[in-house]
Image: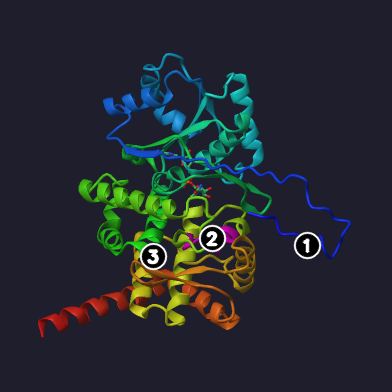
Amino acid sequence: MKPSLAVSPTEHPDVAAPELELSLGASRSWRFGVDLFEDVTSASFTRWIKTHLNDHRILVVMTPTVYRLYSQQLSACWSVLDVEPRVFVLACTEITKSIDAVMAVCRQAQEADIDRRGVLVSIGGGVCSDIVGLAASLLRRGISHVRIPTTLIGQVDAGIGLKGGVNFGVLKSYIGCFYPPKAVAVIPTFLRTLSEDGILQGIAEIVKLACVCDSALFEDVEATVTDLTRTRFQEPEAVAKKVLRRSISGMLTQLSENPFETVTLERAVDFGHTLSHPLEAATGYQLHHGFAVAIDIAFSAILASRLSLITEREALRIVHLLTNAGLPIYHAKLDGSLVEGAFDATKKHRNGALNLVVPTGIGRHTFVKDTNCLSMSLIGETIEYLQKASHTTARLPVDDAIRNQHENARNALRL
Ligand SMILES: NC(=O)c1ccc[n+]([C@@H]2O[C@H](COP(=O)([O-])OP(=O)(O)OC[C@H]3O[C@@H](n4cnc5c(N)ncnc54)[C@H](O)[C@@H]3O)[C@@H](O)[C@H]2O)c1
């Protein structure tokens, strides 16, 4: 491709044509597998460890909680390796998710004498894999990394994608990279020790995908969300596995169509990720990412129904799924100026277009391209609706609305 010049040589004879025009183009192909295993102790997982990690210098990064709960079981896995890995326990929270944490991983890698063939392994939630992925992209201009996500968000979203990143001031994931892992192992039994909140945060990401891409997934979650949360995604076993598999394959399909976000800036999986980032930051990261995503989903669904892009019934069904699961749909920091600021920041990130993802039905979506149709009064009404619906008593009308609709449908069938 010829470079475009601001002035042409004929207009400015002093600007001589280059004697020689050379260029270099390169592309790198990549592929990684996401493999599911029954348990940390299963023989197939041990084989996976050996395949991906043997004969390399390894730095394993895990969070204090994961270390406390799983280091013993994991040490049996390391015993199949010729060289024992170095283990680094790093506190990974949204507040410590900064370039300092990345540097701490790099220092440990240096001390462990990690060479170009070395591999970093992250075992933890999305914060851990985001920090380790970024460190791997920087060390020796890029070494391999392997992910073993231990949270639900990690297993269905953060840990199976190809992004790493950290926060910078109030800007979430402002410093980051697209840097695919070498391999990912998903082990659902890790979820047994998650808190209820930990499961709910992951459910918010699953609902995100289901709302815009997969109505069958939505129905499965809608029917079993209480059991899935109570049993930490262990029971009903068949549904839990199905929901995990569908979420992972749905996410991978979405990512494979636009892995480096160069094909389009219209991404269905950005649903729930427009207000959520500034909302998290506005709460000093006290509000967890998954909860902020749930609020953003509810906002976008109600906004879409007010724009007549989705029926009121379907929008309420989405909100009802969130509230029924126990997810928040409102936060006191959600106001008109936060939404306005979020739209401005999003436009900068999406090359001038808002591309707000909104559902047009269960499992379908469209993009609201600009802010012209989004008046401040419409935004205010939407927030007010969510505030009222979020109170326990005000949840009833939402439930009632859904129940009434089901009742009507049943009556219609009887007729
Ligand atoms: N890179 C991406 O594409 C992407 C996508 C989605 C989310 N994210 C990021 O992921 C982060 C959220 O990730 P998260 O929800 O995993 O939270 P998290 O990483 O903050 O982990 C939450 C807590 O759970 C603990 N924990 C981990 N596994 C556990 C287990 N099995 N049992 C008990 N406790 C356990 C951790 O020690 C941690 O204290 C956010 O920073 C978000 O921005 C990134």
User: How far is mark 2 from mark 3, CA to CA?
Assistant: 17 Å
Tag on residue 212? 3
Look at mark 1 in the image and give the residue it sits on. Answer: 6
Q: Residues within 10 Å of mark 1 (few under 14, many from 20)?
A: few
Residue 278 sits inside the magenta stretch: yes
Q: Residue furthest right?
A: 14
Q: In the image, what residue type sits under mark 3?
A: Val
Circles 3 and 1 in contact, beta carbons < 8 Å: no
Residue 262, placed above or below residue 318: above
Q: Judge depth for marks 2 and 3 and give the one in front.
A: 3
Is label 2 or label 1 in front? 1
Task: Give SS at disc 3.
Answer: helix
Can residue 249 be seen here? The reply is yes
- Camera-near label (3 vs 1) is 1
Farthest residue to the bottom: give it.
415
* Dot placed on the residue nearer the N-terminal end, 2 or 3: 3
Foreground pick, 4 / 99: 4
How far apart are the alpha carbons under marks 2 and 1?
Answer: 40 Å
Identity of the amino acid at label 2?
A: Ser
Q: Earlier in the sequence, mark 3 or mark 1?
A: 1
Q: Quadrant of residue 370?
A: bottom right
Residue at mark 2: 276
Q: Earlier in the sequence, mark 2 or mark 1?
A: 1
Classify residue 283 as left or right of residue 403.
right
Give the residues in magenta. 270-279
